[in-house]
């Protein structure tokens, strides 16, 4: 498992994702800051690219332009119009590996927390917008488990006022040192646990190798595509594979690929001097095998029935038992 590096300052690296559609057809755009874990939300009735850009422009007007933006391969974020919007604002687009939501784990984790509030609001038939605002102020003013500080304090360098009484704040310099150490420690522990649970090990897939690729399947189809693909590019845990005919390329995680190894035909041996395979064997070798099998047969013990004397239990002494 590869973990994301901790940014140098707030709002430098962010992640975006669309949550939904909900029961009423609306969706929620979630924007998370990797440094502070502070996140913004916007309820959308339409998820077309132009609407997503419009909401992001509104958010960037409040907090400024980030240096990088991580998103999945949804049609809104893969559109040329969205990429052009980021290029104009000098924002690097980091697209996650297809079919691998763990690559955008921070925002996916926030979505899971966020869904609990949405389910409660729906079950109690309360207004979604009002319940969302209550959740946001509670989340932003609560110390995060990883950083040990509130998202609002790390984002704005101050605490936001709530109904709860406050204690004296921790000095800023000491706070920044603590959050970096805590973030590193939590990510290392999370990586160790995930690797142990998944029995993860290093991948031996390299550029130029032939690999089998996982495909969407049901219970009756094989896990891997039988046709081998060629690895043409590798970056960390991400690989780009090329179809056998060279017409298509796919971006995948190494976890979705398996090295393709050809098998030698039975009875073939390789001549180390000439590299020529032959199917012949010497007579002496055959005789050794025959003698070895004969010796094994002679040394095999004959199985016999147990010689233990069988006796009926005492409780059957008053009965005639055949």
Image (cartoon, grey):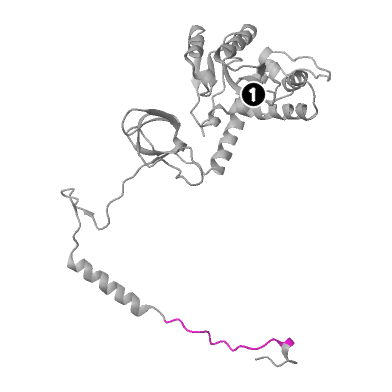
> Residue 176 in magenta?
no
Q: Residue at x 55, y 30 (%)?
A: 101
Q: Secondary structure of the magenta portion, mostly?
A: loop
Q: Looking at the image, which is closer to me, 39 or 34?
A: 39
Answer few, some or many: residues within 10 Å of disc 1's Cα (few below 14, many 20 plus, some between 14 and 19): many
The part of the chain drawn in magenta is 302-315
Whether residue 275 is situated above or below residue 81 in the rendered picture: below
Q: Residue 188 appears at what percent x and percent y?
A: 57, 33
Quarter location, residue 177: top right
Residue where numbered disc 1 is placed: 179
The residue lying furthest to the front in this view is 24
**Labels in figure, total:** 1
Q: Position of residue 88 (x, y in %)?
A: 49, 7
Q: Is residue 311 magenta?
A: yes
Quarter of the rendering containing residue 182: top right
Does 228 appear above or below 106? below
Q: Position of residue 137 (x, y in %)?
A: 75, 18
Q: Is residue 120 left or right of residue 25?
A: right
């Amino acid at each position: 498992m590869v973990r994301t590096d901790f940014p140098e300052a707030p709002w430098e690296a962010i992640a975006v994702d669309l949550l939904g559609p909900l029961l009423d057809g609306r969706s929620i755009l979630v924007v998370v800051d990797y440094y502070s874990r502070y996140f913004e939300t916007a309820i959308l009735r339409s998820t077309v690219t132009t609407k997503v850009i419009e909401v992001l422009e509104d958010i960037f007007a409040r907090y400024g332009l980030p240096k990088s933006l991580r998103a999945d391969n949804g049609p809104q974020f893969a559109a040329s119009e969205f990429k052009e919007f980021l290029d104009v604002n000098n924002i690097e687009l980091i697209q996650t590996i297809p079919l691998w939501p763990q690559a955008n784990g921070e925002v996916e984790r926030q979505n899971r927390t966020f869904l609990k509030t949405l389910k409660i609001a729906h079950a109690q038939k309360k207004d979604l917008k009002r319940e969302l605002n209550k959740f946001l102020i509670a989340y932003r003013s609560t110390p995060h488990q990883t950083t040990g500080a509130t998202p609002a304090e790390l984002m704005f360098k101050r605490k936001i006022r709530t109904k709860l009484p406050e204690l004296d704040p921790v000095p800023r310099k000491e706070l920044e040192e603590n959050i970096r150490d805590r973030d590193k420690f939590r990510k290392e522990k999370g990586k160790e646990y995930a690797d142990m649970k998944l029995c993860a090990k290093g991948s031996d897939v390299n550029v130029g190798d032939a690999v089998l690729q996982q495909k969407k399947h049901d219970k009756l189809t094989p896990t891997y595509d039988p046709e081998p693909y060629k690895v043409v590019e590798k970056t960390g845990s991400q690989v780009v594979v090329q179809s056998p005919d060279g017409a298509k390329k796919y971006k995948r995680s190494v976890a979705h690929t398996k090295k393709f190894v050809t098998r030698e035909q039975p009875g073939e041996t390789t001549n180390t001097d000439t590299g020529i395979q032959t199917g012949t064997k010497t007579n002496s070798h055959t005789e050794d095998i025959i003698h070895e099998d004969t010796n094994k047969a002679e040394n095999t013990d004959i199985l016999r029935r147990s010689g233990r004397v069988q006796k009926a239990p005492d409780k059957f002494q008053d009965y005639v038992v055949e």
